Image (cartoon, rainbow, N blue to C red):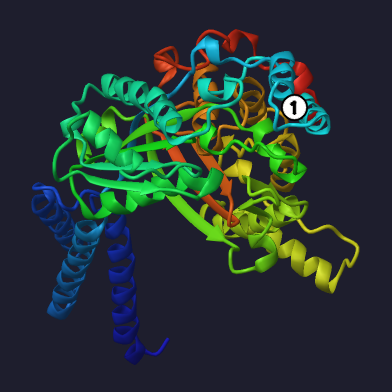
Amino acid sequence: MDPLSLPKLKQHNSLSNIIAIFLSTMAMLPKNLHSTSTPLQLLLVLLSLQRLFLFQQWNWNPIFHLLLLFCFFLVYVLRVGALAFKPPSVYLVDFSCFKPPSTCQLPLSRFIQHASSIISFDSQSVEFMAKIVASSGLSEQTYLPPALLSSPPKTHQREYIKEAEMILLPLMDDLLTKAKLSPRDIDILVVHCSAFCPSPSLSSIIVNKYSMRSDVKSFNLSGMGCSAGAIGIDLAQNLLKTNNNCYAIVISTEILSAGWYSGHERSKLLINCLFRMGSAALLLTNRKEASKTSKYRLIRTLRTQTAFDDKAYLTAIREEDDDGKLGVTINKGLLPAAGELLRSHMTILGLKILPLTEKLKHVVSVIRKKFNDKEGEIYMPSFKTAIQHFCLPTSGRALIGEIAKGLNLDGRDVEASLMTLHRFGNQSSSSMWYELAYMEAKERVKKGDKVLMLGMGTGPKCCSCVWECVRPIAGDSNKNNPWRDCIHLYPIEAVSSIFQT
């Protein structure tokens, strides 16, 4: 070797050593760089490296020392800056689900008898509704509000308010008791109900009943359909990003007496058959100390919609019939439109949460099919590699089946959805919380597990939330859980067997 090349080689090796040591030191840096002990820890790292250099008797140029110090300073500034501007985590402290009184239960035989006594329904309408309810997957223990159990049904403003107070006030009491909070501790309140939008709003009714603070940020959402539960969480999350040390309550409900249809059009009678009483309230916070006591941490939310497409937009719409009676029309194109919406939504979500291996398998299969094996199948990524539990829309067994097929889920993955539909019916935006309550009652959710909540509503729109369980919750399963008195009866094999492979 040429002796003249030795200094260059030594210099090259020294520079390589600097880069290697710099990269390894980055990994040694503490994660909590914003703590008070960070400067001391950083200084100890630098001194350790200095001793290492002396021990190896490396002949360093002073410029290398300055370069190394500058690199450490740059890493420190960048990481501290990133932590300083990082929004606080949002935690789910607890949630409550409303369980109606037994006097509101409506067995199938009673439903048929009751519908037959309503003058506005002819025999064909009653027969159609009986057929839909019998094949819907609903049990004999679902609930309707007192106003709809009257003959004729009471569908006017006063009854709507009574139903709202019957549901919302006990729900708020239970949630505040669980969290050991006062109504005046709440900073943000979000209430959503599709069919009923009074003035003053439902959120204002709660603020008035509980004498909440004058500066509470209250919001009332309407017309968002079954996706409103996840949308309300997304709204609360955005508010918590810009307001520190806050508590937020999100309430999902539906006032069924305001959505009852008393006409003859079959496309509007479906609402009477599937929707049942239910409501849920959840407490969110961005307080740092909540990380030790909360149940879940919100990892991600995602919203997509296809309201820009006229065909999809008209698949479910509230309108009057020929006699001027108001109802929600559900068209035959709803399932295909929901399938397209779900496909685009889950594609975006998969890019964000799926592991790299699943993404690569999909890409490789697409390339192989295009250039090599024309008859080969494209690999569909498995969401079960990133998600352990699924809370799906309970709009009916057909929709649950389509979603399960599209996501390659098995009977156990959709068990909570099917059992919630069976026991409580379609509770619109609050159903996902009854599903999570089912999983907790079965003690299936473990620390570190991730839960996907998927809401799909009119528009059509789709919204999803991904939660991570941050503490063991097995001991909490019996605290006012709506499944407490019947969880030992579930799952019902006759209901879940249609999805067994």
Q: Quadrant of residue 474?
A: top left
Return the residue nearer the eye: 447 or 6.
447
* Horizontal side of residue 484 vs 324, given as left or right: left
Residue 404 appears at what percent x and percent y? 71, 40
At x 45% / y 51%, what residue is drawn? 301
Residue 9 appears at what percent x and percent y? 35, 82
At x 13% / y 42%, what residue is drawn? 214
> Is disc 1 placed on a helix, strand or loop?
helix
Residue 500 in view of the camera: no
Return the residue nearer the eye: 33 or 227.
227
Q: Say which quadrant the N terminus sits in.
A: bottom left
At x 58% / y 49%, what residue is drawn? 457
* Horizontal side of residue 264 vs 222, given as left or right: right
Residue 232 appears at what percent x and percent y? 41, 46
Q: Is residue 95 above or below residue 480?
A: below
Residue labelled with disc 1: 133
Q: Amino acid at mark 1?
A: Val
Q: Residue furthest right?
A: 375
Residue 303 in view of the camera: yes
Q: Say which quadrant the C terminus sits in.
A: top right
Q: Tag 1: Cα neighbours inside 10 Å, few (<14), some, or many (≥20)?
A: some
Count of marks overlaid on the render? 1
* Horizontal side of residue 444 vs 122, given as left or right: left
Q: Is residue 204 above or below residue 43?
A: above
Q: Is residue 102 above or below residue 253?
A: above
Return the residue nearer the eye: 344 or 448.
344
Return the residue nearer the eye: 270 or 71.
270
* Horizontal side of residue 425 vs 87, given as left or right: right
At x 62% / y 53%, what residue is drawn? 319
Residue 257 appears at what percent x and percent y? 53, 32
